């Protein structure tokens, strides 16, 4: 088997269970199984340039290779082009795009740095798997330096329709960069269709099935929905957690139910709309007042980007307003926490919550939805309420699917979830758990690697 070299903006600390973020979780689960090298930025922002050789640390079967960036790189490549242009644009939020030409220059420069660092460690038989929107031009940069190894790309976030993509300057160049990979993977058929439309209409490429012909080369495109390690998460959820147990006991005595949301505090996750939907539940169905609470964990992320500070203020005001209106001396309707929680505590909380409330306005996949399902017991499972704009909704059809822009629709779904019969909950849970087992973390790694190493047809 050839050595697997993974590249992403950051490498995850594989021993730190408090780390938040879907890419770290998904790639970490996969790489632990197969071993290999993982290269990324070390989080440092230096005042000066450093030579390209990465620093290497061994962690079991995985070597972590890291490089520093400069403050200017961080501002232009990371905060700038990646998170103020591509992130909002790919999530269909043209209103939040903040483009400056130096961002694009920084983006190209840093992709060049990643390529220089990789060239110092690559071996002839390596297969290279590059992740996410920060590194779209990396294959082109590597090819320019003479790299002939196979290269795959996986986009963790949505790929927008051509009319939206066209809002970013140099969009054609971006898509041409994608075509320098051998395999390009997406989370959903919608994303895959958007790319295929673009290359057919704007670049005039020939397509046969999922193969894109560009000049002499053939590029495989495919849909590889990311999954989780279901058994590991389910076991974590069953491990006793004293604090969660005491609180759950108190709730049971009072016959109170719990709705849970867990997200990075990102404007794509639909958090204000979610709080408003919970308030609407209390308005439309007053029988739930004092009988149900919403616990929302919002993990700090990208705090230096202005749009993130705005959404934080909005959420704090909203949760305060709902509590001011409805709270009683012995009941707090919204428990809003702005912090990171250890992964095992999250798993335990999912298991004791009657509703998993996952309502992004747009999301590549959303692993929280899959984790909530994995954490449930078959004896008394909770209900997943899921946005139709999460990639996960393409697979998890037995969840209660909602429109995150319609708070009445979400409130009705919450009411339905809170009053659903045990039999229906069990039927839905069985179907959902079967689906997340069928396409788990292992399947994701294996099917992508199959396409990349053997140029096998991409699974439908
Ligand atoms: C991107 C795409 C795609 C969250 N808070 C805490 C915490 N988390 C964990 C969750 C989950 C992960 O972080 C979040 O993953 P998501 O998939 O929900 O979302 P993104 O971070 O936006 O991930 C997404 C994903 O990449 C993978 O391809 O699904 O669409 O946007 O695992 O449990 N973990 C801990 N403490 C927290 O406070 N320990």
Image (tube, rainbow, N blue to C red):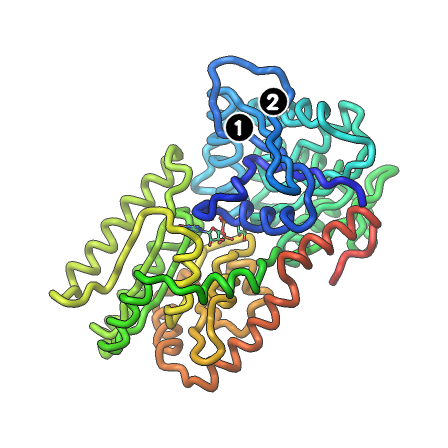
**Left or right relative to 1: residue 363:** left
Residue 51, image x, y percentages: 62, 15
Q: Residue at x 52, y 63 (%)?
A: 370
**Nearest the eye: 182 or 115:** 115
Label 2 Cα crowd, 10 Å radius (few <14 / some 14-19 / many 20+)? some
Label 1 Cα crowd, 10 Å radius (few <14 / some 14-19 / many 20+)? many
**Left or right relative to 75: residue 145:** right
Q: CA distance from mark 1 to mark 2?
A: 8 Å
Quarter of the rendering occupied by the N terminus:
top right
Q: Which residue is mark 2?
A: 109
Label 1 vs 2, first from the N-terminus: 1
Q: Cβ–Cβ below 8 Å for labels 1 and 2?
A: yes
**Nearest the eye: 78 or 427:** 427
The residue most toward the right is 216
**Left or right relative to 220: residue 94:** left
Q: Which residue is mark 1?
A: 77
Q: Is residue 395 above or below residue 152?
A: below
**Nearest the eye: 2 or 146:** 2
The residue most toward the left is 329
């Amino acid at each position: 088997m050839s050595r697997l070299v993974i590249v992403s903006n950051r490498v995850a600390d594989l021993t730190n269970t408090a780390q938040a973020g879907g890419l770290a979780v998904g790639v970490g689960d996969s790489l632990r199984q197969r071993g290999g090298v993982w290269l990324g930025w070390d989080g440092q922002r230096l005042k000066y340039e450093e030579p390209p050789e990465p620093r290497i640390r061994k962690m079991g079967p995985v070597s972590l290779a890291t490089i520093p960036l400069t403050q200017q790189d961080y501002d232009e490549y990371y905060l700038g082009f990646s998170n103020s242009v591509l992130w909002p644009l790919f999530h269909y939020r043209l209103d939040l795009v903040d483009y400056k030409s130096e961002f694009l220059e920084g983006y190209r420069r840093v992709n060049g740095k990643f390529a220089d660092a990789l060239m110092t460690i690559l071996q002839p038989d390596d297969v290279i798997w590059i992740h996410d929107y920060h590194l779209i031009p990396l294959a082109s940069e590597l090819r320019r330096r003479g790299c002939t190894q196979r290269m795959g790309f996986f986009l963790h976030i949505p790929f927008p329709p051509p009319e939206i993509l066209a809002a970013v300057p140099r969009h054609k160049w971006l898509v041409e960069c994608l075509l320098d990979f051998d395999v390009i993977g997406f989370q959903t058929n919608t994303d895959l269709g958007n790319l295929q439309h673009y290359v057919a209409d704007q670049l005039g490429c020939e397509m046969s099935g999922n193969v894109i012909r560009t000049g002499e080369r053939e590029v495989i495109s495919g849909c590889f929905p990311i999954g989780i390690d279901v058994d590991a998460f389910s076991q974590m959820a069953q491990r006793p957690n004293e604090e969660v147990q005491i609180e759950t006991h108190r709730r049971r005595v009072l016959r109170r139910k719990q709705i849970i949301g867990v997200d990075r505090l990102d404007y794509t996750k639909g958090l204000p709309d979610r709080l408003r939907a919970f308030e609407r539940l209390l308005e439309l169905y007053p029988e739930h007042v004092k009988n149900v609470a919403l616990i929302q964990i919002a993990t700090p992320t990208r705090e230096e980007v202005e749009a993130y500070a705005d959404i934080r203020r909005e959420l704090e005001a909203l949760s305060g307003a709902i509590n001011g209106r409805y709270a009683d001396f012995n009941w707090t309707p919204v428990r809003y926490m702005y912090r990171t929680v250890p992964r095992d505590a999250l798993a335990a909380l999912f298991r004791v919550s009657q509703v998993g409330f996952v309502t992004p306005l747009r999301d590549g996949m959303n692993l929280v939805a899959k984790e909530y399902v994995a954490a449930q017991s078959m004896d008394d499972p909770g209900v997943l309420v899921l946005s139709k704009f999460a990639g996960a909704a393409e697979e998890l059809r037995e969840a209660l699917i909602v429109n995150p822009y319609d708070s009445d629709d979400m409130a009705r779904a919450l009411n339905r979830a809170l009053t659903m019969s045990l039999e229906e909950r069990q039927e839905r849970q069985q179907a959902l758990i079967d689906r997340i087992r069928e396409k788990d973390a292992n399947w994701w790694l294996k099917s992508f690697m199959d396409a990349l190493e053997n140029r096998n047809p991409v699974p439908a």
